[in-house]
Image: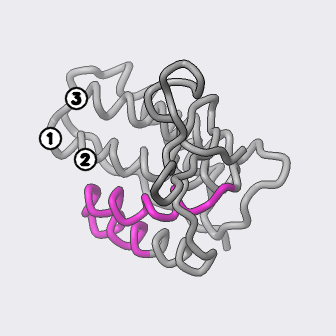
Amino acid sequence: MIRPEQVGGAPGRGGRERGVGRARGATVLQGGRAKAYRPISADARAAAQAAGLAAYERGEFFEAHELMEPAWMGTDDLAERELHQGLIKLAAAFVHADRGNRLGIQKNLRGAHLHLAAALAAPAPTPTEIDVATIVAAIEDRLARLAARPSDPAIAPIPISRLA
């Protein structure tokens, strides 16, 4: 659902719609929360995802996160948003791994799992060459290993599997 972004509460209760007297912003209701929506073309979203995945595969996890954000914010298709946000959370997990922040790793892996599983379960999943099911299973495995060995400092990135 796309709606005007609210600033300062509901209209009529001291709040007003953003955009009164200036360009209107929009949000998409995702997971019960209003999320930024800055529409871009399907080609631009695909390019942002490809650039982000290339950075991820080079081990540039922060860059991957940043490069994929326009793809996530650029669509109002909820299944596609879940896919992009799941990949962003996956990259963010390994930003935290580089920093030695185990709680950040676990939190972002759980978030990645939630969003990627939702992308898989969508009534009309987004067509992609990414093997989302394999990544979801790898996240489950990684979370189980982190829980079993909380002091293990070695946390290797999860590869982005591709469909044949």
Which mark sits nearer the N-terminus, 3 or 2?
2
Picture coordinates of residue 28, whole percent (x, y): 62, 45
- Circle number at residue 152: 3
| Residue at x 52% of width, y 61% of height | 38
Image-quadrant location for residue 4: top right
From the top left corner, tell me how far across and down residue 90 is, in percent: 42, 47
- Residue at screen point 59% across, 81% down: 43
Numbered disc 1: secondary structure? loop
The N terminus - image quarter: top right
Magenta-tinted stretch? 51-76
- Could you tell me how far apart the alpha carbons at marks 2 and 1 are, in whole angstroms? 7 Å
Tell me, yes or no, if residue 72 can be seen here: no
Q: State whether residue 159 is above or below residue 133.
A: below
**Type of the residue with mark 3:** Asp
Q: Which residue is tagged 2?
A: 95
Q: Amino acid at mark 2?
A: Val
Front residue of 89/151: it is: 89
Q: Is residue 22 visible?
A: yes
Give the residue at x 31% y 34%.
105
The type of residue carrying mark 1 is Arg
Along the viewing direction, whichever of 37 and 24 lies nearer the viewer: 24
Residue at numbered disc 1: 99
CA distance for labels 1 and 3: 14 Å
Is 62 part of what is drawn in magenta? Answer: yes
Residue occupying the far right of the picture: 123
Q: Residue at x 63, y 29 (%)?
A: 32
Residue 146 percent across, percent down from the top left? 35, 27
